[in-house]
Amino acid sequence: MDELKAKERLSKLVSPEVLADVTRIRIMKALSIEDRPCGELFNKYPNGKKHMEILEKEGIVKKTAKGFYTFFSLAKPEIKDALADL
């Protein structure tokens, strides 16, 4: 994924705080493909819990409980569109 291209596309959709760390862009890209369990995101990405808290506070992601698991998904479809071909 081209992070510079992603930052350019996302700059109109999200705050500069979100774009300040490339990990958040990678998380958004992963969520644009499919919903992910919180444990996977927390373990796969450095400081995953912190990044998810920022994304959730900004209204970019949402949590959904499914049985014993909590999943994250993108709350804004326009972000999925911006990341579609990266």
Image (spheres, helix red, strand yellow):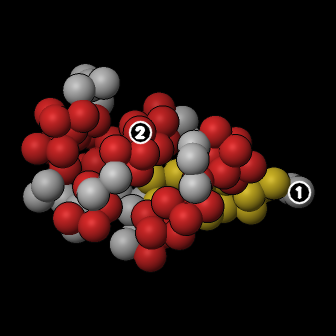
Name the amino acid, label 2. Arg
Q: Mark 2 points at which residue?
A: 26
Looking at this rendering, what residue extends furthest in the front direction?
46
Q: What element carries label 2?
A: helix
Task: Please name the residue shown 27% across and 57% down the image.
Answer: 20
Numbered label attached to residue 15 = none
Q: Earlier in the sequence, mark 2 or mark 1?
A: 2
Q: Nearer the viewer, mark 2 or mark 1?
A: 2
Name the amino acid, label 1. Phe
Cα–Cα gap, marks 2 and 1: 26 Å
Q: In which quarter of the image is residue 16?
A: bottom left
Classify the position of the C terminus by image quarter. top left
> Could you tell me residue 36's position as x and y percent?
63, 43
Task: Please name the residue shown 58% across and 55% down the image.
Answer: 47
Q: In which quarter of the image is residue 55?
A: bottom left
> Could you tell me residue 35's position as x and y percent?
58, 43
Classify the position of the N terminus by image quarter. top left
Task: Please name the residue shown 29% across and 48% down the image.
Answer: 79
Q: Is residue 32 above or below residue 11?
A: above
Classify mark 2: residues with Cα within 10 Å, few (<14), some (14-19) or many (20+): some
Q: Name the residue under label 1.
A: 68
